[in-house]
């Protein structure tokens, strides 16, 4: 009897806390989304960043960029050669200019690659849609070909105007041959005798 009571108490404990006997707060609910985790890195929208990189890549590939870059470098070099000594910030080997151009190139290359990857993804989707459209067109063409073939087969059994004419010509020829074999007078004389 003592064991029955302890079993009942355990059963009541299970029903109160759930089948796993874990506290309710620590159980994972599968019917609800998980709460957002705190991240150390800032979040960003990949699509917005991709659009930004495409705009930069488009600008880097224009003549306007080349003109502005050439003017900037020319002014940089001319200023650091002909400006008063106190106002120059980059002397003759132009190390700072080289650093700035390297920095610009190190950022431009990944941005251009990102823009190319996005364009490749768009091209892949477009090619897939074109392939599916081609498959549908081929299927439609095959269906229409089968339909035309069945119509031709059906028309082969239909009497055409030319076929009817040829049949009439054959009948007329056959009638003329019978008339030549059996003249009309002979036929009328034999009929009168039978009556």
Image (spheres, grey):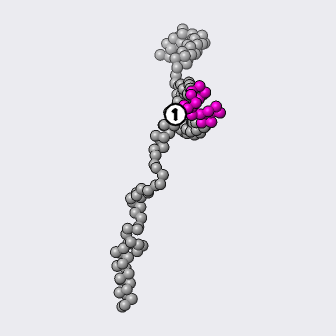
Q: What element does badge 1 sit on?
A: helix
Residue 93 painted magenta: yes
**Residue linked to disc 1:** 56
Q: Which residues are magenta?
A: 80-97
In the picture shown, does residue 114 fall above or below 195? below
Do we see residue 133 in this rendering?
Answer: no
Residue at point 58% right, 13% down? Answer: 173
Q: Is residue 132 above or below residue 183?
A: below
Q: Residue 72 at what x, y percent from top left?
A: 55, 28
Please report the residue visible at 40 percent of the width from the left and 58 percent of the height from the top.
35
Q: Residue furthest right?
A: 93
Q: Quadrant of residue 31?
A: bottom left
Tell me if residue 136 is in the magenta stretch.
no
The answer to whether any part of residue 35 appears in the image is yes
Residue 95 position (above or below residue 159): below
The residue nearer to you, when weighing 150 against 69, is: 69
């Amino acid at each position: 009897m003592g064991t029955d009571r302890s079993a009942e108490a355990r059963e009541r404990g299970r029903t109160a806390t759930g089948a796993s006997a874990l506290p309710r707060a620590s159980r994972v609910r599968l019917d609800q989304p998980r709460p957002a985790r705190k991240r150390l890195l800032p979040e960003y929208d990949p699509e917005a960043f991709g659009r930004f990189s495409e705009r930069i890549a488009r600008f880097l590939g224009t003549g306007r960029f080349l003109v502005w870059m050439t003017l900037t470098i020319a002014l940089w070099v001319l200023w650091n050669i002909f400006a008063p000594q106190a106002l120059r910030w980059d002397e003759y080997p132009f190390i700072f200019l080289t650093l700035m151009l390297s920095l610009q190139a190190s950022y431009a290359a990944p941005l251009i690659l990102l823009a190319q990857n996005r364009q490749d993804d768009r091209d892949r989707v477009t090619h897939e849609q074109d392939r599916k459209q081609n498959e549908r067109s081929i299927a439609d063409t095959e269906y229409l070909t089968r339909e035309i073939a069945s119509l031709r087969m059906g028309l082969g059994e239909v009497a055409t105007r030319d076929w009817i004419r040829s049949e009439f010509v054959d009948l007329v020829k056959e009638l003329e041959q019978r008339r030549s074999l059996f003249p009309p007078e002979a036929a009328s004389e034999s009929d009168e005798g039978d009556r």
